[in-house]
Image (cartoon, helix red, strand yellow):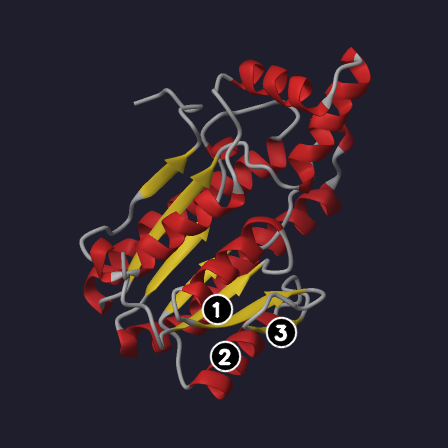
């Protein structure tokens, strides 16, 4: 299906690997002009890389300015940056919390604030990539769960503003997606149980309560849809793309 995104401009944070890279590549395949933001830049084919550390308060505005200078405006912002620290609550100090909030939540706040005037001009949209941990609390994921929950509330608040300004704001909660972090967890199961990769992945999926793990391209496909006119009446939605992991109403 042609989503009619050709020629539109996207800024994607966290674009060097994993879900963010898959999103950038998918948007390029849809004909979009994409600025991929990450600490090491982004070398995905067809993506204009922009290297910066989004924990720096000045970096998000500079990234948006780079997109406007290169492409003339912004139609879509995808906030996908920032891996949060996992671990025992009592072992995580203030620096761990501050670093995770800076890299994910405040990066999204600052990127959105910088991009908003351009999005208003083009009646564009924002997609936040949060995570299922924002709805499913876990003792070893206190930071990530809190950050993701904050992003969900931020989505709803911005969507309220977006009704007036003509900017759609939505959020995706990925479940267990095959990224480097998940592959590391699978490797631990392989070592503990003495099984191969397929058996370890299946066991971990069963323990999670899903039939299989998701692929990064499945998240990217939802982003492309949300960016299109096909999703024109979707505003303030929080979409769980998790294989049925979250069972709460």
Determine contact: label 2, label 1, CB under 8 Å.
yes
Q: Nearer the viewer, residue 154 or 240?
A: 240
**In the rendered structure, which disc, 2 or 1, sits on the residue that comes first in sequence?**
1
In the rendered structure, the answer to whether residue 199 lies left or right of residue 129 reads: right
Distance between the Cα atoms at labels 2 and 1?
7 Å
In the rendered structure, the answer to whether residue 231 lies left or right of residue 132 reads: left
Image coordinates of residue 5 in percent, x first then y, are 32, 68
Determine contact: label 3, label 2, CB under 8 Å.
yes
- Residue 58 appears in view: no
In the rendered structure, the answer to whether residue 174 lies left or right of residue 182 reads: left
Helix, strand or loop for disc 2: helix
**In the rendered structure, which disc, 3 or 2, sits on the residue that comes first in sequence?**
3
In the rendered structure, the answer to whether residue 19 lies left or right of residue 200 reads: left
The residue tagged 1 is 11
**In the rendered structure, which disc, 1 or 3, sits on the residue that comes first in sequence?**
1
Q: Does residue 97 sit above or below 208 in this rendering?
A: below
Determine contact: label 1, label 3, CB under 8 Å.
no
Distance between the Cα atoms at labels 1 and 3?
10 Å
Circle 2 Cα neighbour tier, 10 Å, few/some/many (<14 / 14–19 / ≥20): many
Image coordinates of residue 102 in percent, x first then y, are 62, 55
Helix, strand or loop for disc 3: strand
* Residue at point 45%, 45% (across, down): 219
Image coordinates of residue 61 in percent, x first then y, are 53, 75
Image coordinates of residue 117 in percent, x first then y, are 35, 76
The residue tagged 2 is 67
Distance between the Cα atoms at labels 3 and 2?
9 Å
Q: Which mark is residue 202?
A: none
Q: Nearer the viewer, residue 154 or 83?
A: 83
* Residue at point 48%, 68% (across, down): 11
The residue tagged 3 is 50
Circle 3 Cα neighbour tier, 10 Å, few/some/many (<14 / 14–19 / ≥20): many
């Amino acid at each position: 299906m042609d989503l009619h995104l050709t020629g539109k401009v996207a800024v994607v944070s966290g674009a060097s690997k994993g879900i963010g890279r898959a999103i950038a590549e998918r948007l390029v395949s849809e004909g979009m002009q994409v600025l991929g933001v990450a600490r090491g830049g982004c070398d995905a084919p067809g993506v204009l890389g922009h290297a910066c550390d989004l924990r720096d308060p000045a970096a998000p505005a500079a990234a948006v300015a780079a997109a406007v200078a290169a492409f003339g405006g912004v139609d879509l912002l995808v906030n996908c940056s920032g891996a949060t620290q996992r671990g025992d609550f009592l072992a995580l100090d203030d620096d761990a919390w501050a670093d995770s909030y800076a890299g994910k939540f405040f990066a999204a706040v600052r990127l959105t604030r910088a991009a908003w005037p351009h999005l208003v001009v083009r009646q564009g949209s924002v997609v936040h990539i949060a995570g299922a941990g924002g709805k499913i609390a876990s003792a070893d994921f206190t930071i990530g769960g809190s950050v993701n929950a904050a992003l969900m509330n931020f989505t709803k608040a911005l969507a309220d503003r977006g009704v007036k300004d003509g900017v759609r704001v939505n959020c995706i909660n990925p479940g267990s997606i095959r990224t480097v972090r998940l592959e590391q967890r699978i490797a631990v199961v392989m070592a503990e149980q003495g099984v191969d990769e397929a058996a370890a992945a299946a066991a971990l999926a069963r323990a999670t309560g899903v039939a299989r793990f998701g692929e990064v391209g499945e998240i990217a496909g939802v982003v492309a849809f949300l960016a299109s006119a096909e999703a024109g009446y979707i505003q303030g939605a929080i979409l769980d793309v998790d294989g049925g992991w979250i069972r709460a109403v």
